[in-house]
Amino acid sequence: MTEVSGKSGRHAAGPGSLSERNNGAGRHSVEHPDDAQSWVEPEYVEPTEHVEPTAYVEASANPQADDAVTEVIPVVAQAPVAAAVEPETSASAASAASAGPPGETRLAAKRRLRRRPRVALLVGGLFAVLAIAYGIDLFVSSGSVPRGVTVAGIDLGGKDKGEAEAILRDRLGERSEQPVAVAIGDLRSEVVPVAAGLQVDVATTMDAVGSQPLNPITRLTSFFTTRETDVTSIVDDAALTAAVTDLAASTDRKPVEGNVVFEGAEPIPVEPAVGQTLDVEGAKAALIAGWADENPVELPVVVGGVAVDATAVDRAIEEVARPAVSSEVVFTGRDNKSAVLRPELVGAVLTFVPDGRGGLAPEYNRDAATAILAPQLAVTDVKPKDAVIAVDSGFPRIVPAVVGDMVSWQKTLDQLPALLGASGARTAATIYEPVQPALTTEGATGLGIKEVIGEYSTGGFESASGVNIRKVAEVVNGAIVKPGDTFSLNGFTGPRGLEQGYVESGVIDHGRPAKAVGGGISQFATTLYNATYFAGLEDVTHTEHSYYISRYPEAREATVYEGAIDLQFRNNTNSGILIESFGDSSNVTVRVWGTKTVDVESVTGDRYAQTQPELVTLPKGDDCVASKGAPGFTTSNTRIISDRASGNEVYRHTRTVKYDPVPIVKCE
């Protein structure tokens, strides 16, 4: 018996065949096969919620064969009443669930069921084929470089690893010996990798390539894609740093500020240009990363900007530079004299500097302008003259100073900017001012130079040496050293060469007689040293001869050499010092004038530690001067200074000197 659940009970079909049809809107009709006109409409129950059809019920077309399917009728489940359906109905629904969608015949259902194994077999076969292909591919490629792998643009995919290593070693080894183009800002250069300490590390690079992937997706996509592996390099850091430093030396440049310069009377614009400095560490990293590629390597630089642009340059030319060279600038002086700044000389005076606001500011070089203009009006200057203390008839006499009257170029040139910018008259008068002498008459009188406080003379020099000695005595004569000042013989005389009137004369060179321009000056130095020694002045520096010269006092003499050995003393008195020096054919004398306040005593020690001379044999000729030689020795000198008024000792100093032996020279 087939049961269909209704609202509140069951509708049971009798022993005959019973079919149920859906009349829409959830209603069902039941037909009896023996009475097609009679039907009973079961009560309709509105479902409380929508429930999808879950089963199909087969109605028997033959009362004698319930298993024959004549029509498949959907059954709508009524959620609230479902519990009232007997188990038989649920079983029938479950049986109908496998029958297929509504309207499907039993034959169609059987065909559909027969197709399911075929699809399963097809899918399984496909997976089997893929699995076999995967296994074959994995087996065949075992020991090879994964597909799609490139190193520095070199395709290694699918190659035997040994073959791949050989290719890398050969190709990249060749590249390492060829110049690699590098871009450094807007400049181009080249680097040879092997010379820069860069080589390929083949073993490590191959390790990075890796082994065959097991992921089937990766293996499949490798047929259509590539994977670039970076080159690992062996790096000699010292060589690489040196190579990059060399690059920096040739490519670094300072920024060029926009400016204006002059070529003659024509102002020329200087176009601004940024600077660049190679980032050494960054460049090393870039070369390590990219030398093996065939592309130029971009090296990082630090760019230095500029403050002045081209517009500011053009403005400075039009507003300042061109007017400045439009015509001459004239400064009038005394006695109808004048000084002229010509347009072609303006560039030495007028320059430009950044003004801090993106523009250019003019600068006027007054020293350069003075150097151009002052000589043109020098004849109108009255130069100052210092007071002179001259010794006349054995007494010092003061020659009065002269106050000068000269052009004050600093004040005169205050007018220069306006004159250079003027479009009309460009003429101005010079300004003169009094100029005081360095030593006024009053100043010379107050120095207290009234008597000789130290004096010394030496002689025994040859004729040529006498020329030099008298020359230097003439230069030094009249020198005044104010209280507290230091006198330098080299500094006061300046160069002592042929141009200054000195001649070639005898000198001692490594213990042997020789000749040089200025020979004999050391005798004057010894004379001056002894005069200041007995004047009680402070010894700042002096140097004895290496070999003793018999015409000088032992341990109380001095030598000088231009630019190297000097004689200096300081005026440690309260009065000024005047040096009087003069010479004749055989002697030179130095007197120190001032105010005498001390007495000086000199004590020379005995000779000791004598050393014997060695024999030197030289070829005969002008360069060989024979000498008998002399022994060396050590000795000392003590200076004792006493106060003149009280007689008390105020200073004592002992100086020890070692003289080398003078070699015996033979000319053969």
Image (spheres, rainbow, N blue to C red):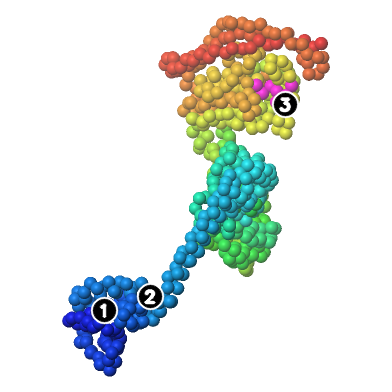
Q: Residues within 10 Å of mark 3 (few under 14, many from 20)?
A: some
Q: Nearer the viewer, residue 495 or 237?
A: 237
Q: Earlier in the sequence, mark 2 or mark 1?
A: 1
Mark 3–mark 2 distance (CA, rounded to whole Å): 133 Å
Residue farthest bottom in this picture? 37
Residue 155: image x %, image y %? 63, 51
**Residue 351 visible (yes or no):** no
In this figure, which residue is indicated by the disc labeled 3? 517
- The amino acid marked with disc number 1 is Thr
Q: Nearer the viewer, residue 175 or 196?
A: 175
Q: Residues within 10 Å of mark 2 (few under 14, many from 20)?
A: some
Residue located at (61% from left, 51% from top)? 157
Specify the label residue 2 is tagged with: 1
Please tell me whether residue 272 is drawn above or below residue 554 in the rendered image.
below
Please tell me whether residue 518 is drawn above or below residue 545 in the rendered image.
below
Mark 1–mark 3 distance (CA, rounded to whole Å): 150 Å
Identify the magenta region: 515-522
- The amino acid marked with disc number 2 is Gly
Q: Earlier in the sequence, mark 1 or mark 3?
A: 1
Please tell me whether mark 3 or mark 2 is closer to you in this view: 2
Circle 2: element type: loop
Circle 3: element type: strand
Quadrant position of residue 107: bottom left
- The amino acid marked with disc number 3 is Val
Q: Earlier in the sequence, mark 3 or mark 2?
A: 2
Please tell me whether mark 2 or mark 1 is closer to you in this view: 1
- Residue 520 sits inside the magenta stretch: yes
